[in-house]
Amino acid sequence: MASNIAARVVDVITKTQHLELGKVTAESTFIELNIDSLDGLQIMFALEEEFGLNIPDDVAKKFSTVQQAIDGITALTAAKEVSPAEIK
């Protein structure tokens, strides 16, 4: 599932920033991709829509690489799959 999340995150970033296919990799930094803070907000909204998540501001502020975005989405997705009612 993690590779599916990674591919979807890369796809969202590629599409929202109108970048060529293959330019965005997990190792890419937002600086290398010329992603500024406004672009970052656009990406966060697109990721929230793609994954049906709410990305807290404190989590989003930590994203400065594609891998950090992948890791953050993976953690939020895993937390969403375990609802509080299931925890005993």
Image (cartoon, grey):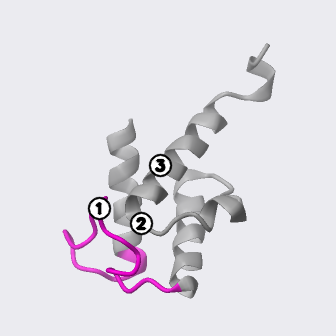
In contact (CB < 8 Å): disc 2 and disc 1: yes
Looking at the rendered structure, the kind of residue marked 2 is: Thr
Say if 11 sits above or below 7 in the image. Answer: below
Determine which residue is flagged by label 1: 27
> Could you tell me what secondary structure mostly forms the magenta stretch?
loop
Q: The N terminus appears in which quarter of the rendering?
A: top left
Determine which residue is flagged by label 3: 71
Q: CA distance from mark 3 to mark 1?
A: 12 Å
Question: In the shown orientation, is residue 58 left or right of residue 70?
Answer: right
| Residue 42 drawn at (x, y percent) | 55, 78
- The range drawn in magenta is 15-36
Q: CA distance from mark 2 to mark 1?
A: 7 Å
Crowd class of label 3 (few under 14; some 14 to 19; many from 20; radius 10 Å) = some
Q: N-terminal of the two: label 3 or label 2?
A: 2
Determine which residue is flagged by label 2: 65
Q: CA distance from mark 3 to mark 2?
A: 10 Å
Q: Which residue is located at x 57 percent, y 63 percent?
A: 62
- Was residue 19 drawn as part of the magenta stretch in this picture? yes
Element marked by disc 2: loop
Q: Which residue is located at x 64 percent, y 58 percent?
A: 59
Q: Which residue is located at x 64 percent, y 36 percent?
A: 79
Element marked by disc 3: helix
Question: In the shown orientation, is residue 54 left or right of residue 7?
Answer: right
Element marked by disc 1: loop
| Residue 39 drawn at (x, y percent) | 51, 83
Looking at the rendered structure, the kind of residue marked 1 is: Glu
- The mark found on residue 2 in the picture is none
